[in-house]
Image (tube, rainbow, N blue to C red):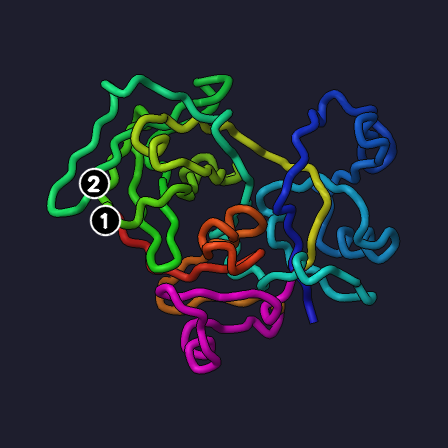
Amino acid sequence: MKKFLTIPNPCHENWDQMTPVEKGRFCKVCSKKVYDLTDLSTSEVENLFEEKGENICIRIKPTQNFLPIRKKQTFKFSPYKLAMSAIIASSLTLSTETFSQSLTTYNQDKIDITDTDQFVTIKEQIECSYDQDKVDFKHMRVALITLDQVYSTFTQEDGKYSMKVPQNIIGEKNIIRVFPNEISIDTFSRTYTFSKQDIYETNIKFENIIAVIGEPIFFEKDSTNIIYKGKPINTSQERELMLIDQETGCWNLKNDLHFEYFWGETAKILSDNKFEELIILYELNQL
């Protein structure tokens, strides 16, 4: 059996300010060694966890998010640290919680909303949080996430986007996930939480993240809630929608489906506090 590696709650300490040590760096804030996995092969990563166990701090790159790890020893995890297996490498996503401090707020008279037949059009812009030249804004995907449906649109060259959604899906807290374009494939996606007011009057500050640091979790398919069109999937739907690769142990999606993994606060917001972690399966429809 294989488990899958991710860091759902990354640390925000600066890698460059840590002390270099063998196989990684030492974080003085946490008094803990951080193992650098970014240049390791899958077998080398497996050997590291076999030797050190799962209670270590690591640094990974986007292509290692949801990396399948062959089970070589018995891992022990809390129920909240179990989730579904990763699905397709091209859908790599990091569920990073980003709140109001990463948003640029504007005055009420700059809100641009169109309300027609109980739909609202959200017109905003993605900005770089530190160096404008380091982000290619064109054709980034912006997704408003709900259990029933994922509403997606794409940015223009200047980072502006427009998304028309049903007014009744806008809640007190709303989850938006931003995906880098194909040029920036080595950058993690970012997840943002907006209040009902913020979603209409804030631009998103996006930053290139080429590696993340934190404590890993290892998860497998049967240990989480898999949602499709607002409802948990049953065994029949699972056989219809998902396919296991016998060689790699990875689960792939059929019928051009995509998936998003959510953990912690975002999962609670999306499920109205019912779940600590979940996977949403969805078709990609541009608005």
Q: Is residue 85 left or right of residue 119?
A: right
Q: Quadrant of residue 83?
A: bottom right
Q: Earlier in the sequence, mark 2 or mark 1?
A: 2
Name the kind of residue labelled 2 in the image: Val
Q: Is residue 190 left or right of residue 51?
A: left
Kindly indicate whether the residue at mark 1 contacts the one at mark 2 (C-beta within 8 angstroms): yes
Res 246 visible = yes
Q: Residues within 10 Å of mark 1 (few under 14, many from 20)?
A: some
Q: Is residue 71 above or below residue 153?
A: below
State yes or no: residue 228 in magenta: yes
| Residue at mark 2 to residue at mark 1: CA–CA distance | 6 Å
Q: Quadrant of residue 72?
A: bottom right
Q: Which residue is mark 1?
A: 166
What residue is drawn where x is 31% and y is 24%? 158
Secondary structure under the numbered disc 2 in the rendered image:
strand
What residue is drawn where x is 52% and y is 66%? 225
The percent position of residue 230, horizontal first and vertical second, equals: 37, 64
What residue is drawn where x is 58% and y is 46%? 63
Res 39 visible = no
State yes or no: residue 152 in magenta: no
Name the kind of residue labelled 1 in the image: Pro
Foreground residue among 283 and 72: 283
- Furthest-bottom residue in this view: 236
What residue is drawn where x is 46% and y is 76%? 238
Q: Which residue is mark 2?
A: 120
- The residue stretch that appears in magenta: 219-247
Q: Residues within 10 Å of mark 2 (few under 14, many from 20)?
A: many
